[in-house]
Image: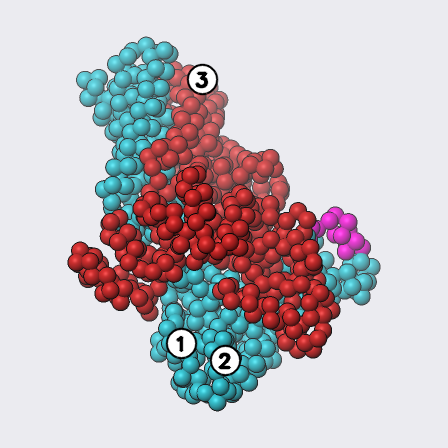
Chain colours: A red, B cyan
Amino acid sequence: MEFKISKELISQLEQLIAAKRDSELNVLLEDMHHADIAEILDELDFNEATYIFKVLDSEKTAEILLELEDDLRENILSRLSPKEIAEELDELETNDAADIIAELSKDKKDEVISELQDVEHAKDIVDLLRYSEDTAGGIMHKELVKVNENWSVLTCVKEMRIQAENISRVHSIYVVDDENRLKGRLSLKDLLTTSTRAQISDIYISKLNSVKVDTEDVEVARIMQKYDLEAIPVVDELGRLVGRITIDDIVDVIKDEAEKDYQLAAGITQDVEANDSVLELTKARLPWLLMGMVIELFASQVLDANQAISDQFRTLMIFVPLLSATAGNIGVQASAIVVQGLANGSVKEFNRHYFSKELTVSMISGTIISLFLLCYHYVLYGQFLVGFAISISMIAVILFAATLGTLVPLLLHRNKIDPAIATGPFITTSNDVFGIFLYFVIARLILGV
Amino acid sequence: MEFKISKELISQLEQLIAAKRDSELNVLLEDMHHADIAEILDELDFNEATYIFKVLDSEKTAEILLELEDDLRENILSRLSPKEIAEELDELETNDAADIIAELSKDKKDEVISELQDVEHAKDIVDLLRYSEDTAGGIMHKELVKVNENWSVLTCVKEMRIQAENISRVHSIYVVDDENRLKGRLSLKDLLTTSTRAQISDIYISKLNSVKVDTEDVEVARIMQKYDLEAIPVVDELGRLVGRITIDDIVDVIKDEAEKDYQLAAGITQDVEANDSVLELTKARLPWLLMGMVIELFASQVLDANQAISDQFRTLMIFVPLLSATAGNIGVQASAIVVQGLANGSVKEFNRHYFSKELTVSMISGTIISLFLLCYHYVLYGQFLVGFAISISMIAVILFAATLGTLVPLLLHRNKIDPAIATGPFITTSNDVFGIFLYFVIARLILGV
């Protein structure tokens, strides 16, 4: 059922481009979905992609533009004049147009805006550019259907027909007063079953969820999911209806939020992608590496200070990597479960019941690992007491790592810091240093050094 | 605008429950959204929550049931008779009802099904139970509006009114033939602007995306996002229309998929949550810990084999944790970017351009870290050559880790294994062992031992 790009199609297109057979290109691509054409352009080289882009008409290319990979879009936009870009944007919904303008350089941005033909549309786009990306204002559309509470049903139906023409999905009809303040919504059913002379103010439903322009996008996502909404109106500080957010805008927010946790866990700060520049990638990654290095310098100090005991009991040192890795792994596991619990609401604050469960899980895991290690050490190196010291230290370090792993995300969360940081390099390396320190302290106690 | 639970509300409810003032409870909760009531019940103890649940009528409680935390839902279901559970399920959409039945024990499941009153509804629910959770069949609803291609527009409009009554959001009208095979969809506009005597077969649109019942849920999510669909029909092996998936069903799939990556990166296999049992948590976590341990035993072997050189150049050993941590961090960073690239389609297979960019980023990071280390070592321990050996080894290990981090997810992906495993403990510990091995090999070469 679904479209798949074939090698034949690509080479056919390349031949048509080389021969400049524009009309045949148009026929070939005419019936394809814009998302599929975008996929094809991503497979071609920049020149070929731009060629096809210029052959197709702007109604189609505008939608394609939205679906392209960032670097190809950037490349194509750089080859279009401000007037040509404005033609594309005139075809798009306000929100999508604003997103593309935001990618342009300051100078080009102004030129493109001045070339927009539809004045109302241009005003809406410029309005959207004011809001920061991660707020309701930054993700909302201007396209919506609204009616005045003082209208009659008849006027309302007429007006709605005009407004709905430019909107792909109506979802809801919003009711506003003369000052454009949001009053409620209208059910299509009520509208159709009421006398055409009735006033809107008599039939609208005043109970309605809405968000403010400066509400954080993740908060909007949470509200829409909780109340199972397909669209939510956005109001400004004075309660005036300024836009609407639909569920498909929220899908990206949810995805980005989940990906951010993953990136933090992997030690990547900014939202970078495989096709970002070396500089951007380095900026997102190097700080974590340096911080990890500085923390691990303390580990080197701990090892340095324990050279004597390591010389005396030679196997102590060789299990340090095993100890570090196990402590790191268990700490990250403990943190990840708390982080996800905080995200989905099943964990809210410190909870003794949960904490003792975590310690039980760690104790079981720690005991199994330590017993295995005790046997391994005895078989390979004899020296039961040293093996015993290593095993007991291992359990202690595991319990410590689990405790830190549980508490740190809670502490970060309470201080309004993203708890997912706790599953990243900062905690794993800190765990390392504490773990190695504890290991030698306990080993010294048992071995009586 | 949004509802917030207050301590006062909770204590007021607790008093009303203690005094068994049912009608006042009903009045207090009457106008609240079911998602808000679910949040309140999660704050109360099991007995109080069950009490309120029994006081409210099943139209409301059915929706509440869907929103509760897993353990509270389980608890409440265990206190309801099969007949009472069936009453709840009769109020729900087929998909939601099937999800709740799937949580029951085998015996109770059959009893509940036999108590369902609406036979058509029961048939649909049982039908849905056949499909595995992570397929289109497992996430689809039975609720949809369909018309026969042989009907006239008039019959069609009449039938649609009846069908739409039980459906909260119509989205699309599907057209089927006499054998219930999906033929296309109907635009509401065409339906309203055509003569009532026209046949559906003359006006329907045959171009339509659909998925098969056994299509993977993540694939459905991908298609719906790519083509920006709010609903997609589901067909069986013979092309018969059996259900429909809407965008809100897909939101959960997208969230789960992103969370799975995060869990794999944290070394947690199954989909566990903070309130799962100790056994489940241990089963999801212990295998990774054991595997990490076994791999790190090789690291202990490498260190054991290098005791002599460590004795001679005493600072070599103390930087092993720093080396491991840095290699691990850079490897995970490299993998995470590839994993996300594979997920969003910006990386498809091995790409020399991207690989050389990754090596450049690692080379820059490695050089900065090594230079810092060289100075640190010289200031603290003198012995320039040893510091030099450590620094060069560090660069080599970093480049090696970045290479492994880039290639392993691609390799896993090509073999149809989830590439996010590469950001978990398996790769970090393997990186450790190879890194430590390489470190000593290079140090030996430079120091001439």
Q: Is A36 located above or below residue A45 in the figure? A: below
Residue B8 within the segment the image draws in magenta: yes
Task: Locate residue A427 relative to residue B354 in the image: left or right.
Answer: right
Residue furthest out toward the bottom? B197
Foreground residue among B326 and B432? B326
Query: In this picture, which residue range is highlighted in magenta?
Result: B3-15
Whether labels 2 and 3 belong to a single chain: the reply is no
**Circle 1: element type:** loop
Task: Locate residue A163 relative to residue B351 in the image: left or right.
Answer: right
Read off the chain for label 2. B
Q: Which residue is mark 1?
A: B205
Q: CA–CA distance between discs 2 and 3?
A: 93 Å
* Kind of residue at disc 2: Thr
Q: Which residue is mark 2?
A: B193
Query: Residue at point 70% right, 64% down?
Result: A149
Q: Is residue B380 visible?
A: yes
Image x and y of residue A319, in percent: 36, 29
Q: For the image shown, how many numbered marks are present on the structure?
A: 3
Reading the chain from its start, which is encountered first: label 2 or label 1? 2
Foreground residue among A13 and B401? A13
Disc 2 crowd, CA 10 A, few/some/many (<14, 14-19, 20+): few
Residue B389 within the segment the image draws in magenta: no
Q: Which residue is mark 3?
A: A449
Disc 1 crowd, CA 10 A, few/some/many (<14, 14-19, 20+): some
Q: Are marks 1 and 3 in contact (CB under 8 Å)?
A: no
Task: Locate residue B254 relative to residue A319 in the image: left or right.
Answer: right
Read off the chain for label 3. A
